[in-house]
Image: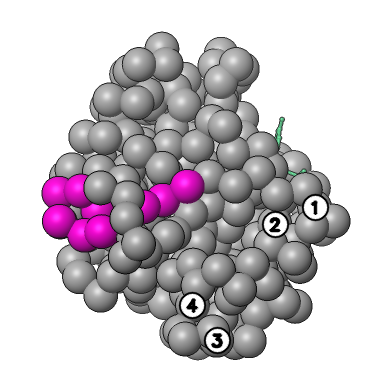
Amino acid sequence: MLNSHTVLTGLFGHPVGHSLSPVMHNRAFNVCGLNYRYAAFDIQPERVGSAVDAIRALGIRGVNVTVPHKISVIPYLDEIDEEAALIGAVNTIVNENGRLVGYNTDGRGYVRSLVEESGINVRKQSAVMIGAGGGARGVAVALLQAGLPSLVIVNRSVDKAKQLAEDIKHVNPSSVVHTVVPGDIPDVIKESTLLIQTTSVGMHPNVLETPLAPELLHEGMLVSDLVYNPLQTKLLQEAHNRGARTHGGLGMLIYQGALSFEYWTGIKAPVDEMRAAAMKELEKRS
Ligand code: ATR
């Protein structure tokens, strides 16, 4: 029951109407018997500063931050965790008695999902990552922190790939990070064991799009797509058809949320319940 002791959390984004986070977090609070609630706040870009101030003023315990505010919230916070600073974006704010600390759980959420759902050892993979945007940055930093030895970044805009490689090459001094132009993808993919698709290619409504020719996929690799709508992208279908193992994007959403939940509540997130709530909501919409 919502009462005078209810602790409020939520989401800052624009738009937020499509977000699965409210059902996921409210289910988690519910099954854990916590008097917490999670609401979605549609924040206009020019109001980000006042919205962050409202966290302090209203005693909100914390919020998730999504597109387009992940970078613009940073100047309004009191402290940024080292990983979030490295990624250059915040997706979780924790209110510690009026002091707002920014974290980024996207990349760690991705790695946790990848490892738990596929069972691979990140330390033994040779990875190719398609894309160099915000999602790619979080994933790349977390993979390097988890001990990925080799990462090749490929992006439509080559300069952005180079900039990302430059920014993250010091994260793990024993890892090799480099970039190739899209034309060189065939050669690097042959040698790789993990392909990570971080762009919006293949996302609803463009479900027939795929970022690369299916002949390049091979059975020695795990193909991971950050897109979760649809759950099975064209890329993942093609990977499956060619004997590759696959990993979809829903797990990243679940685990980034689970990590945020753990920051706010201090207790272990009920990951299976969160996944079930998100799946049910997706099914309702399809
Ligand atoms: P996000 O935060 O979701 O990663 P972003 O920062 O806008 O979003 O980055 C989008 C990524 O998807 C970029 O790598 C972008 O490539 P460019 O840097 O060349 O723009 C990539 N992307 C988006 N649409 C694409 C398309 N149709 N083909 C290839 N890459 C695409």
Front tag of 1 and 2 = 1
For the record, the magenta segment spans: 29-39
Sequence-wise, the earlier of marks 2 and 4 is: 2
Alpha carbon separation for disc pair 3 and 4: 6 Å
Q: Which residue is mark 4?
A: 95
Alpha carbon separation for disc pair 2 and 4: 17 Å
The residue at the point 54 percent across, 31 percent down is 18
Residue 169 part of the magenta-drawn span: no
The residue at the point 60 percent across, 87 percent down is 79
Circle 1: element type: helix
Circle 3: element type: strand
To which quarter of the image does residue 186 belong? top right
Q: Does residue 155 appear in this view?
A: no
The residue at the point 80 percent across, 52 percent down is 45
The circle on residue 88 is none
Q: Which residue is mark 2?
A: 69
Sequence-wise, the earlier of marks 1 and 2 is: 1
Q: Which residue is mark 3?
A: 99
Q: Looking at the picture, does residue 9 appear above or below residue 68?
A: below
Q: Does residue 284 appear in this view?
A: yes
Mark 2 neighbour density, 10 Å: few (under 14) some (14–19) many (20 or more): some
